[in-house]
Amino acid sequence: MKNILLNFLEINKDKEIIKKAIEALIKIINKWKSKNGIKGKFKISGIYEFGIWVIEDVEINIVFNDHLVSKYFGSEKSICEPLISQNCKDNSLYCFLCREQFKDFEVTFKHLQKHTNKTQKMIELNFEGIKFTIETKENLYKHETNNFLKELPDIKNNDKFTVALFILNRWAKNYFVNQESFGFLDQYSISIMLAKIIKLYQNVSLIELIEHFFMTYLEILEWNKSIPVQIKENQKDKINENKGIFIVLSPTNPEQILAKQINKSTTKIIEKAMLDGYYIKII
């Protein structure tokens, strides 16, 4: 597999830049909270928690601990675009990011987007090439999923898991199956899928681990989509009522569907990408 023996200098190459970007955004959020008397707390998670610090592979997820959508996203009339950005007059975090000027942190309408449809509510922010997402309490399971995985004996301090996760996220990106909002996988679902393979095949090489990943999920996609992928011990098997759709469950209580936008069409695309990943073996 091409470039599979990646060294940790490459995986850590953007660590300082990413850490500074996270710190800068935390300061901005805290400034907004102080200015508007907001007491809500937030959690931060991302693939960097497993030791992957590469700008093009990192997505930082910030989740607030309440459901007050308007407080963070503003109203439907709140728009951050040239000529009509004056419409962003409310005290939401979205409008704050749109209006304010920040030291070492330039935000323009090109960097800032929001999604407030029925299935997805988030702010997307791009800074220095790093993608940030800001969501509300219903998405805390993402943070909890990473916390659970980090403490698994098979995952904790496991360099093989880190490198394999880096490779598989790069595979998903190269084959365009890494965008949750478009009905594909995300860093959380891939992490759970890989953790499942680590538990099943503990004494294999890195290359064999990647091969088992593709082989196992190709078999599931082809023959048995009725059982969702899950990792938590004593987690009861659930029957997937959405026939033909690939589902990965979080280890949280209650369980949540990871990459919940996946549908029948995108399931087939994911299957094709896995087939290519296994046979071509180019990441």
Image: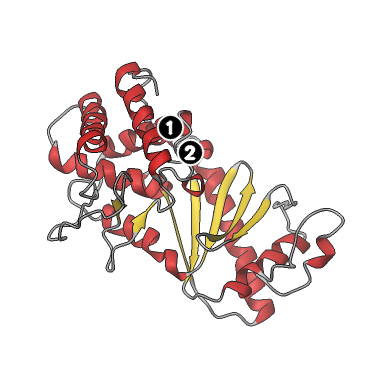
Residue 24 visible in the picture = yes
Q: Position of residue 83 (x, y in %)?
A: 87, 56
106 left or right, relative to 205? right
Quadrant in the picture for residue 216 = top left
Q: Position of residue 133 (x, y in %)?
A: 54, 55
**Is residue 62 placed above or below 156 in the rendered structure?**
below
Front-most of 102 and 59? 59
Q: Which residue is mark 1?
A: 170
Seen at 16% across and 56% down, the residue is 237
Give the label on residue 57, or none.
Answer: 2
Label 1 crowding class (10 Å Cα cut-off): few <14, some 14-19, many 20+?
Answer: some
Q: Position of residue 259 (x, y in %)?
A: 40, 50
Q: Position of residue 186 (x, y in %)?
A: 42, 45
Residue 100 visible in the picture = no
Seen at 48% across and 38% down, the residue is 57
If you read the primary sequence from the N terminus, does the residue marked by circle 2 or circle 1 appear first?
A: 2
Label 2 crowding class (10 Å Cα cut-off): few <14, some 14-19, many 20+?
Answer: some
Amino acid carrying label 2: it is Asp
Amino acid carrying label 1: it is Arg
